Image (cartoon, helix red, strand yellow):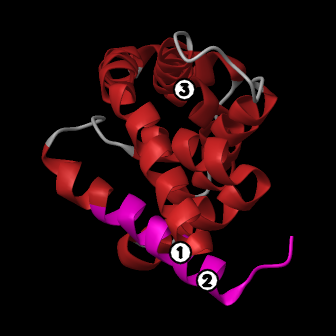
Amino acid sequence: MKLTIKEIAVFAMLGAVMYVSKIIMEFAPNIHLLGVFTIAFTVVYRKKALYPIYTYVILNGIFSGFATWWIPYLYLWTILWGVVMLLPKKMSRKIQPLVYMAVCAAHGFLFGTLYAPAQALLFGLSFKGMIAWIIAGLPMDFIHGVSNFFCGILIVPIISALRLAEKNAENG
């Protein structure tokens, strides 16, 4: 996955956009555009989407601290990226928005469950303790999933904008 100078600049900016969008949305817990960006970047850039995604993860650690809360971020966004990579590249334009919105929502609903194994390992929780941790977080996961679904409306327009920018960069 050799990168051009243009790609390095674009991916750095996209990772920074992810981070800034998170900061802007911090007033509303579990409501953000991170899943939206992860899906859009993955659809457009495929394997190379990992560059802006991990730029975001690293920026998060740099500015918020490389603490135990950050460790699951090393795999949480990769799971969403992997699911999107498994989706068919050629989908009907009619179902694309719903599929992307559903995947984004599922990641939000499952966020606490996906986060829990790292918490269990880091804090020595038993299986019962991990399940209790998941159950305690269900209200926040519900907010996360519902908000991801509605924020997912932006995925297809972002994909279109990124493809247009790529096309203009090639022709310009």
Q: Please name the residue that numbered disc 3 is placed on.
A: 107
- Packing grade of label 2 (10 A; few <14, some 14-19, many >=20) is few
Q: Main secondary structure of the magenta part?
A: helix
Q: Amino acid at mark 3?
A: His
Q: Residues within 10 Å of mark 3 (few under 14, many from 20)?
A: many
Q: How many marks?
A: 3
Front one among 153 and 27: 153
Task: Calculate the distance from the C-alpha at mark 1 to the C-alpha at mark 3.
Answer: 25 Å
Q: Quadrant of the N terminus?
A: bottom right
Question: In this figure, which residue is indicated by the disc labeled 2?
Answer: 6
Task: Label 2: state its secondary structure.
Answer: helix
Say whether marks 2 and 1 touch (CB < 8 Å). yes
Cβ atoms at labels 1 and 3 below 8 Å apart: no
Magenta stretch: give its range: 1-20
What is the three-letter code of the residue carrying label 1?
Val
Quick check: 138 above or below 13? above
**Badge number at residue 10:** 1
Q: Can residue 124 be spotted in the picture?
A: no
- Residue placed at 68% from the left, 18% from the top? 91
Look at the image and say whether residue 162 sits in the magenta stretch.
Answer: no
Write the residue at 57% across / 50% down: 41
Question: Can I make out residue 136 in this image?
Answer: yes
Find numbered disc 3 in the image and state the secondary structure of the residue it sits on.
helix
Which mark sits nearer the N-terminus, 1 or 3?
1
**Residue 20: quarter of image:** bottom left
